Image: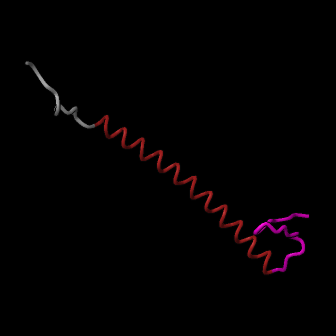
Amino acid sequence: MSTITIDNVEYDTDNLSDQARQQLQMLQVTEQEINRLNAQLAITQTARIAYANALKVALPVSTEGLVIGS
C-alpha cells in the first residue's frame, strides 16, 4: 500500500481512480523532468563560469588605471 498526501489529506494510491492514477503518474514524470532540467541548468551555469574565467585568462593584460613613474 502506497500513499500520497495532497493538501494535508492522505490518499491510498490503490484506491485512486484510473484517471487519478494517470494524473499522479504525469505529475511524477513532470517532477522528474524538472529535476533533470535543474541539473542541466547547474551544469550549464558551471560551464559558463569556466568559460568566463578562461576568457579572462586569454584577454590581454590591461594597463588602464596603472600609475607609472612619479
Residue displayed at 53% across by 50% down: 42
Q: How many marks?
A: 0
Residue 30, by quadrant, is: bottom right
Residue displayed at 13% across by 25% down: 67
* Residue 3, percent from left and from top: 85, 65
Residue 7, by quadrant, is: bottom right
Q: Quadrant of the N terminus?
A: bottom right
On the picture, is 27 further left or further right than 19? left
On the picture, is 68 further left or further right than 27? left
Q: Is residue 3 covered in magenta?
A: yes
Q: Is residue 14 covered in magenta?
A: yes
Residue 24, by quadrant, is: bottom right
What coloring was used for the rendering? secondary structure
- Viewer-closest of 18 and 12: 12
* Residue 26, percent from left and from top: 70, 72
On the picture, is 45 further left or further right than 2? left
- Viewer-closest of 14 and 59: 14
Q: Quadrant of the C terminus?
A: top left
The residue segment tinted magenta is 1-18
Q: Is residue 10 above or below residue 70?
A: below
On the picture, is 60 further left or further right than 1? left
Q: Is residue 19 above or below residue 10?
A: below
Residue displayed at 88% across by 69% down: 12
Q: Residue furthest front?
A: 8
Q: Residue furthest top?
A: 70
* Residue 32, percent from left and from top: 66, 61
* Residue 33, percent from left and from top: 63, 62
Q: Residue furthest right?
A: 1
Q: Is residue 54 above or below residue 44?
A: above
